[in-house]
Image (tube, rainbow, N blue to C red):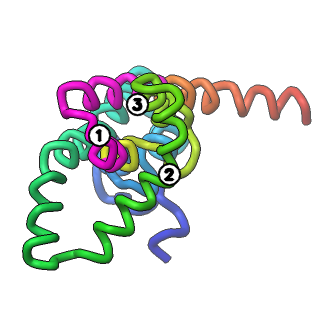
Amino acid sequence: MFISNPATWFVNLPPEVATFLLSMIPITELRASIPIGIEVYGLAVWKVWIIAIIGDIIPAFFILLLIPYAHKLAIKYQLFGKFLTHELENAERKFSGKYEKYGSIALIIFVGIPLPFTGSWTASFASFVFNIPFRKSFPLILIGVCVAATIVTLITLFAGSILGWIL
């Protein structure tokens, strides 16, 4: 099954490319690509960290640039209406209280805490919903991605050691 094991999705590709592609997928992002790159593919930690950040931020860059146009087209031609509406409502629901309370720092925190559905994809949609301009939102999302990458890397490196010590 496709969903069952992300480490096997790109088994025929070089590990660096597989790590990069896993970072770009909204389900996995760097939360899965970093542990897989380090533990499964055996790549150097610094290399995985850089590849994962680049792979994670590229979709955000294009989402931030293109979503205003996609939204206008969707409204005008009633394309992807339900999907786009669902994604925007989902982003607004997850992010609204945080942004209103904490402002721009909320975007960094939202992306930086590596929980499901709090990555760069959702933050990009949230930026659109809350009218945060590209010049402001992209650097904030990038900082959040770097924070998340660091947290996930540290967890990956030390979780095995801690479990070994406990068990």
Amino acid type at circle 2 is Phe
Q: Earlier in the sequence, mark 3 or mark 1?
A: 1
Q: CA distance from mark 3 to mark 1?
A: 10 Å
Q: Which residues are magenta?
A: 125-147
Secondary-structure class at tag 3: helix
Q: Which residue is mark 3?
A: 145
Q: Is residue 128 above or below residue 9?
A: above
Which callout, 1 or 2, points to the residue nearer the camera?
2
Looking at the rendering, in which quadrant would you find the C terminus?
Answer: top right
Residue 2 picture location, percent across and down: 45, 72
Residue 145 picture location, percent across and down: 40, 30
Q: Which residue is mark 1?
A: 55
Q: Which residue is mark 2?
A: 117
Amino acid type at circle 3 is Val
78 lies left or right of 96 = left
10 lies left or right of 100 = left
Amino acid type at circle 1 is Gly
Q: CA distance from mark 1 to mark 2?
A: 16 Å
Which residue is found at the position 81% from the left and 34% from the top?
163
Judge by depth and name the residue closer to the eye, 161 or 58. Answer: 58
